[in-house]
């Protein structure tokens, strides 16, 4: 696995792909306890990074919508 410092440089897609790999490895139950703890910590950092990227994208979309039509009658963008 990569060092935690490089998470900030990852794209949303890269972070999500690594997070999915970590979840799969943890769900398999095959990793030793210490490795599982390290993977869980990295997974938590990747999750936070993905959430931050999604929030930034949501704010960008809202800015585009508000900029195109003005603030009147504009609903905030919601991503599920």
Image (cartoon, grey):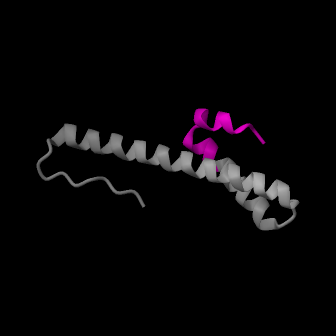
> Image height check: is 1 above or below 41?
above
Q: Which residue is drawn at 14% across and 41% down?
A: 70
- Indicate left or right for 53 with 26 as reference: left
Instruction: Name the one closer to the observer, 65 or 76.
Output: 76
Instruction: Name the one closer to the observer, 23 or 13.
Output: 23
Q: Which residue is drawn at 73% across and 37% down?
A: 3
The quadrant of the image that shows the C terminus is bottom left
- Indicate left or right for 37 with 56 as reference: right
The image quadrant of residue 2 is top right
Magenta span has 17? no
Q: Which residue is drawn at 37% across and 47% down?
A: 58
> Image height check: is 43 above or below 7?
below
Q: Where is residue 14 in the image (x, y as percent from the top left)?
A: 63, 42
Q: Which residue is drawn at 11% across and 48% down?
A: 72
Q: Position of residue 5 (x, y in %)?
A: 66, 34
- Please state the extent of the stretch shown in magenta in the rendering: 1-16
Number of marks:
0
Q: Main secondary structure of the magenta part?
A: helix
Q: Position of residue 26 (x, y in %)?
A: 77, 62
Magenta span has 3? yes
Q: Position of residue 73 (x, y in %)?
A: 13, 53
């Amino acid at each position: 696995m990569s060092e935690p410092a490089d998470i900030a440089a990852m794209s949303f897609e890269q972070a999500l792909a690594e997070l999915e790999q970590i979840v799969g490895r943890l769900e398999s139950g095959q990793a030793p306890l210490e490795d599982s703890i390290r993977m869980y910590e990295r997974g938590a950092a990747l999750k936070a990074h993905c959430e931050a990227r999604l929030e930034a994208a949501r704010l960008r979309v809202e800015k585009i919508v508000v900029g195109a039509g003005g603030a009147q009658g504009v609903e905030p963008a919601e991503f599920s």
